[in-house]
Image (spheres, rainbow, N blue to C red):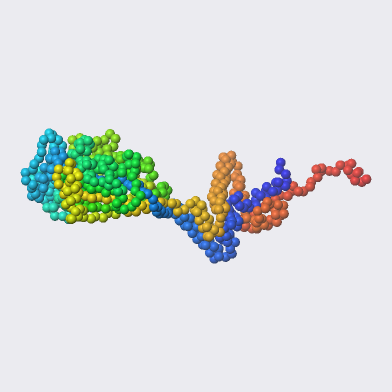
Amino acid sequence: AMAPGKKITAKIKKTLPVTGPQAPTLSELMKWYCLNTNTHGCRRIVVSRGRLRRFIWILLTLSAVGLILWQCAELLMNYYSASVSVTVQFQKLPFPAVTICNINPYKYSAMKDYLSELDKETKNALETFYGFSEGKSKVRRSVGDRNTTGSEFFKQIPLLKFEDFSRTVTDLRSGQKRKIEGNVFHKDSSIVNSGESNDIIGFQLCDANNSSECALYTFSSGVNAIQEWYKLHYMNIMAQIPLETKEKLSYSADDLLLTCFFDGLSCDKRHFTRFHHPLHGNCYTFNSGENGTILSTSTGGSEYGLQVVLYIDEADYNPFLVTSTGAKIIVHDQNEYPFIEDIGTEIETAAATSIGMHFTRSRKLSKPYSDCTETGADIPVENLYNKSYSLQICLHSCFQKAMVDSCGCAQYAQPLPAGAEYCNYKKNPNWMYCYYRLHEKFVKEQLGCQQICKDACSFKEWALTTSIAQWPSTVSEDWMLRVLSWDKGQKINKKLNKTDLANLMVFYKDLNERFISENPANTLVILLSNFGGQLGLWMSCSVVCVIEIVEVFFIDSLSIVMRRRWQKTKKWWNDRKREQVGKPSQASDLDREGHDNPVCIDEDLPTFNTALRLPLPQENHLPRTPPPNYSTLRLETAFTEQLPDTLDVGQH
């Protein structure tokens, strides 16, 4: 059995109000928190007298809490921001790789046997549409059946001339008018509607599996229409020629390079590395680094860079494939693929082109600061170029993969995936329609490539400044051309013309290496310090105060809610059991819970004196804590009658 003193203490503790984290209700918990917290605003809400003053303190406290939340949210969002720093260093710089290509990919004299049928169809189109004629076409046919690589397909995809806006066209081959059937998709309807009907030329591509599904590509310029149509058939023909043969049909290093100087010293074709580009033929890269050595320069200026004289040979250009004369160059890192068709710089003939460079290295922060990739290993796209990752490599590889999956073959202008073949008429009669529709989706960002591919976090960049001067000058033209013809006389069987030559100089304007890097603008220490400053400024609060808020508003409040739910559930269950037995329900703990007592305002344990000071209940008031039963303090005799012998003792 419990000792009498402990019984009194337990009963008083059960009936008197309990404060602090053990409070029975949320309102009592909040009142206890406001009286004991270190945040002065909450305390003033409870102790302030008058509704106006209390309302003002509530408004000020809520405003302070809102400002704290806003400022802390700003700090969190700025935590992942980066500051950019620029460092300039003067040092000996490695010279970049310089890739040079002739704008004309293959010698026209060597390609005529493969392109004879295509050239014939093109000349017929010029004569039919524009009345242009070069006389009787001279077509060489000494190559067997090589000139039939696409003749049967010219009938299926002819050039068309629109007579009006009603789908009535004139066929190139037959000269007859016909109606276009099926669904027509205009590549640029605004051009079609704004131009004159006599100026509209195009071609129609249809799905080989569904002839009613067609796409009509129209051009307001006949030049653009004929070139696009020519390139379409040209890629089909080139895809069927082996790589070894195409390398022989293109320009050799001896054909392209006449003179070479680097850093004031003579160089030759041994300093150039050949690689074959599908659209530009044989290209040559200076300082490619394949032999393990990368050249560098210790002095800026045009005299200490790369100087080459290129032989262009304009007379051997394909008249339908290219309409400009010269060369294309690109400056890039040794580990980067030269995308000449995208970012190449064109070099004029009969001119000296000087290209000054500024070298910049850039470094971006990866996640969570930016959405860039370090090596491209996290990008689900196979790198088809065997070079270091770049955004262009990812986009081209993604499109080529989609081309193979959708069309069953690879596009000619990009590297081959493993196990794939380039598209051509014979094996893939539907590839043109498929390619054009797929490319349209790619441009509209519907293939998902732009969403998958990311920028590289680190990259090198050479900013180019180009200047052009007439070369050679009028007074020096005669002797220079004679000397160059003499030097290359054994390889060039005609007198050189200045329109066949291009002078190129690539050099560093200065040796200042600019390094642009991103650094975190905030660290964890700075973030915590800023949090503490905001809490102290608006609420005179510290980290301990934050822990207290978490404890009271989350842990204790949840405990009270769960405890009350448990008590209600327990009461319901007990009442249900009593109803089944037939006993009356008893008062629950919720009915017997204590209420606020003005006598016990401190947190000390209840004592005998505090119990005696309890006020008596009044009518119509909430039941207060009843006083304890002190019957145990009365002394009762253990015997009902006094023994006779005690009387004798008392008398004595």
Residue 530 lies left or right of residue 133; in this view the side is: right
Q: Please provide percent x and percent y for residue 279.
A: 22, 43
Q: Is residue 515 above or below residue 111?
A: below
Q: Which of 384 and 197 is in front in this view?
A: 384
Left/right of residue 162 with respect to residue 631 in the rendered view: left
Instruction: Decide if residue 22 is in sight here.
Output: yes
Residue 388 sits in quarter: top left
Percent position of residue 87, x then y: 41, 53
What's the residue at 58%, 42% (across, down)?
574
**Left or right of residue 42, residue 76 in this image:** left
| Residue at x-position 13% and y-position 35% | 143
State the residue lying farthest toward the right. 652
The residue at the point 90 percent across, 46 percent down is: 650
At which x and y percent is residue 68?
Answer: 50, 57
Using the image as rendered, state which of residue 178 and residue 330 is in the foreground.
330
Q: Which of 454 and 114 is in front in this view?
A: 114
Horizontal side of residue 330 vs 30, given as left or right: left
- Residue with the most extreme left position: 136
Q: State the count of labels.
A: 0
627 and 300: which is toward the camera: 300
Percent from the top left, x then y, of residue 113?
14, 38
The picture quadrant where one finds residue 490 is top left
Q: In percent of the image, x 59 and y 57: which residue is there?
A: 38
Quadrant the C terminus occupies: top right
Is residue 319 visible to the viewer in this orientation of the structure? no
Considering the image in quadrants, where does the N terminus appear?
Answer: top right
- 79 up-or-down from 173: above or below: below
